[in-house]
Amino acid sequence: MTKTPTWAFDDLAVGQTFALGPKHVTAGEIVAFASEFDMQPMHLDEEAGKASLLGGLAASGWHTCAMFMRMACDTLLLDSTSQGAPGVEYARWRRPVLAGDTLSGEAEVIALRRSEKRPQLGYVTFRHRLRNQRGELVFELEHAGMFLTRDAIS
Amino acid sequence: MSALDEFLQLGETIVIGSHRFEADEIKAFAQKFDPQPFHLDEQAAANSVFGALCASGWHVTAIWMQVNLRHLEAAGERPWAGDGPRPVFGPSPGFRKLRWLKPTFAGSTLTYSRRALHLRGHAGRPGWSILTSLCEAHDETGDKVIAFESDVLVKTA
């Protein structure tokens, strides 16, 4: 079952991009996530959302993070030597993600650094951006992930 | 300490609650949002860098929000002794410096906390300020598992 991953640390270059999405966001998904994790009215109910600063039934910011993660898994991480990530520099919820929106964007490699302690490991810094169907920036996130080198898996 | 500082509990570390991460919920979250093998399957996790089934980092932060909202509801409305209108909380513009310091393995219980760090004016939105809080979780052994700095808008005038 284990196939050699397409993407190892050595295969990534600064400036390289991976497409994120498209991901259509339904009202049902927004409510399901919010019911479990973020039970605030603007994430649960259309009318409450319209009456809030968000202007409609809006996804929890944590839901947007989770949807972003799925897009990153599908476009890169599941077919890579990813060893997880120690954290996130920042995440910005720039505009509300509303029911019916379609999100798409890109993960861009902005820095590469080989581990000094573990020569078969490298840190890859990504800047991720998601836009809605009108091209408006809704989400930005920067993080460094750990990837094994091709040596480590051959 | 001003009425606003007191209302926001500036500088005070507040333990907001605990959550035990069961294997089933770890897998359910991962299937939807983070289907990496070490979040989905005990065997695959045993052979991974983590060594055992562990929760997606995004699951651990989503539970922070759940625990925080339950705590706010249980605590009831904060007393307000200021002269102006009672401050109102708005949406969050984001967070910074999120660190996943230790894996959250199936069966472990995390205890979550938050501490309001500072309040700054919001240049783009008169009458609103941004409250920055340090959010953390510790496991049963006392080790810190996650930390991040979260921002939230507060209408203060």
Image: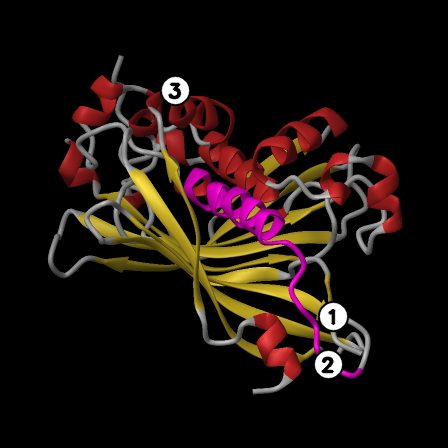
Vertical position of residue B112 compared to residue A57: above or below = below
For marks 3 and 2, give the CA distance. Answer: 47 Å
The answer to whether residue A125 is visible is: no
The secondary structure type at the circle numbered 2 is loop
Residue tagged 2? B82
Magenta region: B59-83
What's the magenta bit mostly, secondary-structure-wise?
helix
Residue pictured at 79% horizontal, 39% vertical: A57
The secondary structure type at the circle numbered 1 is loop
From the top left corner, tell me how far across and down residue B49 is, in percent.
19, 36
Dot 2 surroundings within 10 Å: few (below 14), some, or many (20 or more)? Answer: few
Q: Amino acid at mark 3?
A: Asp
Left or right: A7 in relation to A75? left
Left or right: B156 in relation to A127? right
Residue pictured at 62% horizontal, 73% vertical: B7
For marks 2 and 1, give the CA distance. Answer: 9 Å
Precedes in sequence: disc 2 or disc 1:
2
Vertical position of residue B49 compared to residue B143: above or below = above
* Residue A54 or residue A1, whichever sits in front: A54
Is B64 magenta? The answer is: yes
Precedes in sequence: disc 1 or disc 3:
3
**Which residue in the rendered view is the most extreme toward the top?**
A1
Residue tagged 3? B24
The secondary structure type at the circle numbered 3 is helix
- Quarter of the rendering occupied by the C terminus of chain B: bottom right
User: Which disc, if any, is residue B87?
Assistant: 1
The mark lying in front, picked from 1 and 3, is 1
From the top left corner, tell me how far across and down residue B56 is, in percent.
39, 36
Dot 1 surroundings within 10 Å: few (below 14), some, or many (20 or more)? Answer: some
